[in-house]
Amino acid sequence: MNTPSTYQQVLFVGPGLRDGSQGQAFAAALRTLRGAAPNERIIDTLHSFDGLWQALQAPRQHLGEQVLVVDLEPASDSAYLDWLRDELARRAAAHPQAPRLWVTASALGRRGLAADAVCAEVARSERHLPCERVAPVAADPGWEHPPAHARHLFLCTGPRCVRRGALARWKTLRRHLLDHHLVETPGGVLLTRTACQFPCNRGPLLTVYPDACWYRIATDDDARRLVDEHLLGNRPVAALLIHPPSGGLPDA
Ligand code: FES
């Protein structure tokens, strides 16, 4: 399907675009680069996507034939984009006057909201994806049910923990968990990356629930030790804890 040469509307969609400092700076930079374009809107999805869904309910004569949704979700990945395109496709199908929808993701990740990069993305029509005939998004277990797990691991990938090696720890942790068939299995773990958990100076930080253990995982050996001793051996690793769990350490 050929991408359109022009869009009647461009919607910049992402969390924290209205009130956050980054969002305000982004909006100002966008205005400088693109002018006060009446056919462009910024929609904040920090609390919900309702603003986007409502915007797309407008009659076609207001929206135009072709609408580009520029996704600015910093944690976007392929599964997230599949979900967004699928959701947009379903809503368009339920709305006879819906415009043809296209999606692109800036994939800015942790570089933050760079308005010039976003504008470049708008111009790169070969990367824009149609919201039609989107392959079905897997419904089980990813989108309906919590995956099987006995413990939930929250690895901080906030800015300070990343500087201290959190992303390298994430890879090692995930590799070691996979080697032991512990990723999303009964008795295994659900590994989630998070924003700042606050004790930044003691990071890279990993919390384990329901055990309420707060760990500093400074090295790859620490990551493997945590898996071997806490997750496989069911013994919290006292040497890696930044403070004891509120209920105290269980008896060895
Ligand atoms: S950045 Fe990790 S705890 Fe703050």
Image (tube, rainbow, N blue to C red):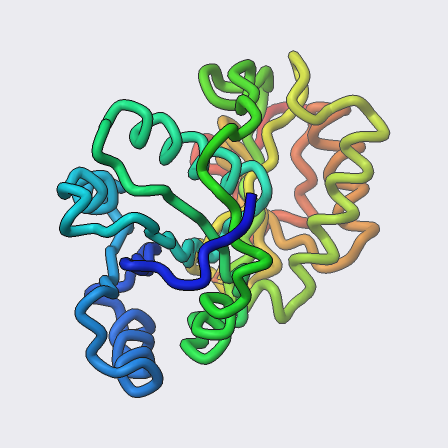
Image spot of residue 221 (x, y percent): 83, 50
Give the vertical position of 135 relative to 28 (above or below): above
Residue furthest bottom as drawn: 32
Viewer-nearest residue: 2 or 216: 2
Q: Is residue 73 left or right of residue 44?
A: right
Viewer-nearest residue: 200 or 91: 91
Which residue is drawn at the image coordinates 53% and 71% (left, top)?
Answer: 111
Q: Is residue 172 left or right of residue 138?
A: right
Image spot of residue 251 (x, y percent): 63, 23
Give the vertical position of 148 relative to 101 (above or below): above
Image spot of residue 150 (x, y percent): 59, 18
Image spot of residue 199 (x, y percent): 47, 60
Q: Quadrant of the N terminus?
A: top right
Q: Is residue 48 left or right of residue 75?
A: left
Viewer-nearest residue: 137 or 221: 137
Q: Quadrant of the C terminus?
A: top right
Which residue is drawn at the image coordinates 46% and 33% (left, top)?
Answer: 132
Give the vertical position of 166 relative to 214 (above or below): below
